Amino acid sequence: MIGHLYTVVIDCPDPDELAGFYEKLLSLTRQPDTGDYVVLQNAAGSPVVAFQRVEDYRAPRWTDATRPAHMHIDVMVTNLDTAEAQVLALGATLLDGSDKPVGYRVYEDPVGHPFCLITPEGA
């Protein structure tokens, strides 16, 4: 085991507005936020879905490969270096500029979908 699913992160132009929609739709509650990054949690207090501000956001179009969905998963790990070696061995690629020593790192899966390895310090 490398890690476990921590949350799904959705890109959007206004995290506060979109979180409000999903807060009601999914019966979740909001954690304290920065405005550029909003996290909704379940009744146990675990993050479930997060929304991050993306400048010049272009909405996806269903089944249109030129306008794909904008989301990624966060995978909670205990050690970034150990987990990185494991995901690289599986075929992931570390993305430029994301080689942070603590908190999180961003990768692509073998076909280009982004995902993050995060530690409790980055959550």
Image: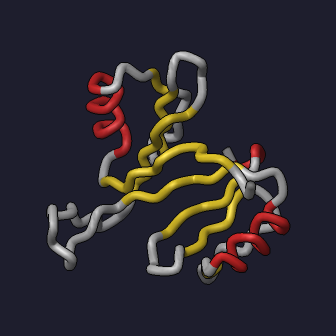
Is 44 in front, or is 96?
A: 44
Where does the image place residue 104, in percent across and percent down from the top left? 69, 59
Q: How is the image coloured?
A: secondary structure
The picture places residue 38, in percent across and down from the top left corner, at 47, 39
Task: Return the x and y of residue 42 as percentages of the image width and height.
Answer: 50, 23
Which residue is situated farthest in the top direction here? 43
Q: Residue at x 67, y 66 (%)?
A: 105
How many marks on residues?
Answer: 0
Residue shown at 20% from the left, 78% from the top:
66
Q: Is residue 68 left or right of residue 43?
A: left
Q: Position of residue 10 (x, y in %)?
A: 39, 51
User: Looking at the picture, does residue 85 appear above or below residue 12?
Assistant: below
100 on left or right of 52: right
Please determine whether, in this image, residue 3 is positioned above or below residue 55.
above
Among the 4 quarters of the image, the one containing residue 60? bottom left
Q: Is residue 41 left or right of residue 90?
A: left
Identify the image quadrant of the C terminus: top right
| The one of 42 and 30 positioned closer to us in this rendering | 42
In which quadrant will I find the N terminus? bottom right
Q: Is residue 93 above or below residue 68?
A: below
Closest to the observer: 34 or 91? 91
Q: Tell me which residue sits at (26%, 69%) in the image.
A: 68
Residue drawn at the location 46% of the way across and 43% of the way down: 50
| Residue 55, quarter of the rendered image | bottom left
Asked if residue 123 is positioned above or below residue 45 in the image, the reply reads below
